[in-house]
């Protein structure tokens, strides 16, 4: 899989590194930057999950998804990693289905939730092919993904959008984060392709896959515009009553079709969110 999908190389490398660490705090210090770009010898799991708590509740509030029904709902988290946000989700929702392509991450995710969340509410889903979820139709009240879809190949990302729509029940919502084009991508895009090619070099590749800067260059594997995602959704058998696109107030974003544009200070200038209610 990693040869066909080179952007997954650093994720699998980080998964192997996490397996060799003695404690969860060591995991955060070694590979925590993979999930929230934080580094430092003093980082620990408590601080790591605390950053996730602040973000998830800010997003749920801003996207008008933090309702009184949360304690009865199921959320599917696409790209859980080692549980930075999953722990908080497990305290707020009746059930969390944490999905990731690396089995080692999912094991560490369970440990994180056991320490800082409600592990009895956690279920994991190993995304072995990087594009489909072993979850039944309509299980989720919310399908959520943050800083994950930009790391997938273009077609895999759209496949996961389809899966998010499929597993969400009528009346439920998808809340999906994407990265779109910026002028800096004129340089980043070719550098990223070069880095992904270098990951396959003997000796050099494995070393690069553990370097923060190299990985941040190489795993930016796609850019998806609101119009492209909207066209994709329109072709699915799952229909959506409302669609809202959230973007940074510091950036102009155009979206045709019937999606409503809103701004939220917490959105990165390069990112945008799709919040849609399934009919």
Image (spheres, grey):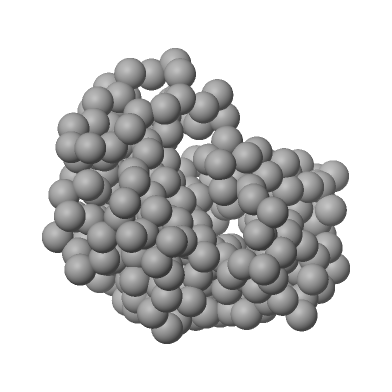
Image location (x, y in percent) of residue 160: 34, 65
Residue drawn at 54 percent across, 56 percent down? 210
Q: Tell me if 112 is positioned left or right of 18 in this view.
A: right
Q: Does residue 187 appear in this view?
A: no
Between 259 and 42, the one lying in front of the other is 259
Between 87 and 137, the one lying in front of the other is 137
- Image quarter (top left, top right, bottom left or bottom right) of the C terminus: bottom left
Q: Tell me if 116 is positioned left or right of 239 in this view.
A: right
Residue drawn at 26 percent across, 44 percent down? 224
Q: Tell me if 131 is positioned left or right of 139 in this view.
A: left
Between 122 and 260, the one lying in front of the other is 260
Residue drawn at 57 percent across, 36 percent down? 62
Q: Quadrant of residue 232?
A: bottom left
Q: Tell me if 112 is positioned left or right of 109 in this view.
A: right
Q: Does residue 120 appear in this view?
A: yes
Q: Quadrant of residue 84?
A: bottom right
Image location (x, y in percent) of residue 120: 76, 80
Q: Quadrant of residue 70?
A: bottom right
**Count of labels shown?**
0
């Amino acid at each position: 899989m990693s040869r066909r999908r080179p952007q997954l190389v650093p994720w699998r490398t980080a998964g192997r590194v996490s397996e060799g660490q003695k404690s969860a705090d060591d995991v955060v210090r070694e590979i925590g930057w993979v999930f929230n770009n934080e580094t430092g010898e003093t980082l620990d799991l408590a601080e790591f999950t605390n950053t996730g708590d602040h973000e998830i509740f800010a997003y749920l509030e801003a996207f008008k998804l933090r309702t009184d029904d949360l304690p009865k709902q199921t959320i599917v988290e696409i790209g859980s990693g080692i549980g930075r946000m999953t722990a908080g989700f497990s305290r707020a929702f009746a059930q969390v289905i944490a999905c990731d392509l690396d089995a080692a991450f999912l094991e560490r995710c369970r440990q994180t939730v056991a320490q800082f969340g409600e592990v009895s509410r956690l279920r994991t889903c190993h995304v072995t092919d990087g594009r489909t979820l072993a979850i039944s139709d309509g299980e989720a009240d919310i399908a959520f993904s943050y800083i994950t879809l930009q790391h997938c190949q273009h077609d895999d990302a759209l496949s996961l959008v389809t899966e998010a729509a499929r597993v969400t029940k009528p009346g439920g919502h998808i809340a999906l984060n994407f990265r779109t084009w910026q002028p800096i991508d004129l340089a980043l895009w070719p550098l990223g392709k070069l880095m992904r090619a270098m990951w396959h070099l003997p000796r050099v590749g494995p070393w690069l896959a553990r370097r923060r800067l190299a990985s941040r260059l190489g795993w930016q594997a796609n850019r998806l515009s609101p119009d492209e995602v909207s066209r994709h959704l329109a072709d699915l058998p799952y229909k959506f009553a409302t669609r809202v696109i959230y973007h940074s107030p510091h950036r102009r974003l155009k979206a045709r079709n019937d999606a409503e544009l809103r701004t939220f200070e917490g959105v990165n200038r390069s990112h945008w969110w799709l919040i849609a209610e399934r009919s």
